[in-house]
Amino acid sequence: MIVTLIILFIFLIIFFLLFRMISVNKTTNLNTLSQEHQKVQSKYEFMVKHKKELIKELAEKEKALTSLRNNREGLKTISADDLDLNEADENEKVSRYLISQGKITMEQNEKVLKKMDVLKLDYLGVCLALGLIDIKTGKQAIKANKVHSRSK
């Protein structure tokens, strides 16, 4: 009887030790997985942030490329009759000039016209504020508009 109790006691100790080893191993594995999850999560957040920065940089570079394409042709001379500027106001003259030069699109023109009331700026001011044209293009538009105004 004592031998059976001793054997039972030994099995109980072995069972307890095995259970403890399994619990420690499980806890270690869970901690390791949790650390790996945090690393992957931080890497993911970094990549999302980096992607947003790259998209923003791409948009800026596309905008610069478009500006360079439009500026490589230089200032073209157009008569007031070609643009039908005789009865138009200053903003309309400038908008037609920019559209004819390919500096802005019709959609951008409509956006500028809507924003003029909100921003309380003239046509060129709104174009500059929205980043549709650069200062050089604005000066070219003013110069072309003055040339047309003098020819009346």
Image: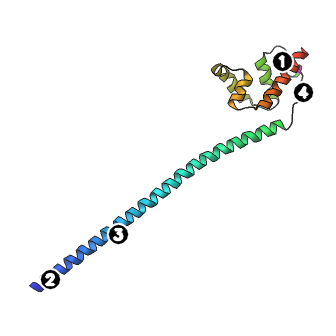
Distance between the alpha carbons at the discs numbered 1 and 3: 84 Å
Q: Name the chief secondary structure element in magenta.
A: loop
Magenta segment = 75-81
Which quarter of the rendered picture does the N terminus lie within? bottom left
Distance between the alpha carbons at the discs numbered 4 and 3: 81 Å
Distance between the alpha carbons at the discs numbered 4 and 1: 14 Å
Q: Secondary structure at mark 2?
A: helix
Q: Position of residue 58 (x, y in %)?
A: 68, 45
Q: Which residue is mark 4?
A: 77
Distance between the alpha carbons at the discs numbered 1 and 2: 111 Å
Name the kind of residue labelled 2 in the image: Ile
Query: Above or below — where is 107 with respect to 7?
Result: above
Which numbered tag is attached to residue 85? Answer: 1
Label 2: few (<14), some (14–19) or many (≥20) C-alpha neighbours in 10 Å: few
Of mark 2 and mark 4, the one earlier in the sequence is 2
Of mark 1 and mark 3, the one earlier in the sequence is 3
Name the kind of residue labelled 3 in the image: Asn
Distance between the alpha carbons at the discs numbered 2 and 4: 110 Å
Q: Position of residue 116 (x, y in %)?
A: 67, 21
Q: Which residue is mark 3?
A: 25
Residue 125 or 4: which is nearer the viewer? 125
Of mark 1 and mark 2, the one earlier in the sequence is 2
Name the kind of residue labelled 1 in the image: Leu
